[in-house]
Amino acid sequence: MREFNPAAIRIFAILTAVSAATLAHADGGCHSPHAPSYVPNVPHLSDDPNSCQGSGQNQGSGQQGWGQQGWGQSQQGVVLQCGQEITANTVLGADMNCAGYTGFALKIVGSGIKFNGNGHKIIAPQALAAIYVQGSNNTITGVTANGVVNGAGLNAYDAPGLVVQENNFSGNEEGILVWAENTSMSNILIFGNIIQNSSLFGIRAGWDTNGQIIQPEIVMNDLSNTGGYALYIQAQQYNMGPQDFNVLYNSLNGIYLKGGGFSITNVSMTQQQIQQVEIFIDSALSVTVNNLDVSTVLPGQPSQQHIGLDLYRCAQFNINGLFSQNEDVGLKLETENGVSPTGTLKNCTFLNENVAAIMITSYDGTPYGVIDVLNSVYQASSKSISLLLSGSTTVPASSIFNFLAPSSNGNGGGNSGDGGDDHDGGGDHDSGGCGH
């Protein structure tokens, strides 16, 4: 774990001042109704229609070694032109008004470059991104870039060793986009940024073709009021813990994890007040959970889309200590396309759920592997059941569903030892197909 600047920690104190506005979202889709239906393509330099405009003007202008003077100190900087490419340490000396610009408003290409926005704004509502960065061990700080309608505040492409610290990328389609296409990206630090009111994603990290992302550090960012998923991470490996402390408050959906292996330890989502899905994990090789609270204080929804933890096509999972209260569904297990997940849940608690403690759904008849629920508490209510098998979904008869009633040593509250006794076709709202 890296050491963080004390000044940055003080800055984070303002991050909980969130806007009440929640923007329109792009959620739903074919297959799992909780996966994003629209994920923007990732533009890079060859997609910039203005790649020949401004490039080469004052390249490398700036001040060498400004980072040694400390973060956030006011310094005299240089004036940059829209579309300019910089290749050396630079301090921005004035706002950049790129209101009609359609490419990347500022390009940072090279290695070991430190760019300090010095509190200035990059105004680029039509841009692919306010800032594009490519190369290794680059640092971006002190920038304000808001209102990029169909792009990102920062687009980092094939940029291992990236540090993005103490910027304001609020009000964009995506706040920060990190993408690996031809390289392995590790040692990524995204820390102390204000990224409120993103229309799709607050922070999105992923890869394509020959790239990969390994264990990014994404900590103490304000991602509140995101219109899609506040945090979207496709990574070879990613471990979540209480030290992350990202603010996701009032976002439509919380965290989306895809591919690779994921570990979640000692995390509570309760105070985030996520409107629909707290955590969605897509096509993971393995999922390990130890002590995760996905309870909500928000009322249930008629659409039954308020989900605590949703595992979609995750081959293997081991969950110890999941706590869910007042969700529509505490744990949703989904599959299709021949993936037959297996997993174990133990020491879990489901209280006052509106539909079911656990819902298991196969969209195309793909059977589940053995799923065991051990030593877990379910509070029976008139509104919900312990286990809901959606449509024609099946699990092996050898699966164990051992639910206990609260404060009881015996089975109770809808125990279904053969994995099918609590099937309720009338309650199926995900019987397959597309959309909600």
Image (spheres, grey):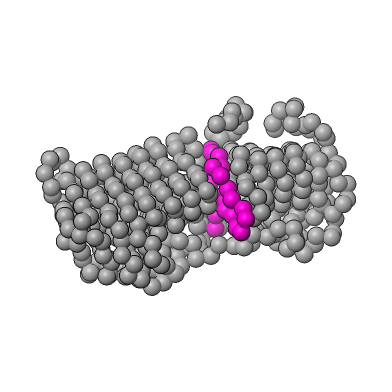
Quarter of the view holding residue 99:
bottom right
Report x, y in % for residue 185. 62, 46
Report x, y in % for residue 2. 58, 31
**Residue 35 belongs to magenta span:** no
Q: Which residues are magenta?
A: 200-225
How many discs mark residues in the rendered view? Answer: 0
Please indicate, yes or no, whether residue 340 appears anywhere in the rendered image. Answer: yes
Residues 29 and 144: in front is 29
Report x, y in % for residue 133. 71, 49
Residues 126 and 204: in front is 204
Report x, y in % for residue 357. 26, 53
Quarter of the view holding residue 407:
top left
Residue at the (32%, 70%) spot, across then down: 365
Residue farthest along the left direction in this orientation: 410
Q: Quarter of the image containing the N terminus? A: top right
Residue at the (70%, 40%) spot, across then down: 137
**Where 327 sits versus 407, above or below?**
below
Residues 265 and 245: in front is 265
- Is 205 left, or right, of 434 in this rendering? right
Residues 373 and 10: in front is 373
**Residue 203 belongs to magenta span:** yes
Residue at the (41%, 72%) spot, across then down: 434
Residue at the (38%, 62%) spot, across then down: 339
Please indicate, yes or no, whether residue 115 appears anywhere in the rendered image. Answer: no
Q: Quarter of the image containing the C terminus? A: bottom left
- Is 410 left, or right, of 181 in this rendering? left
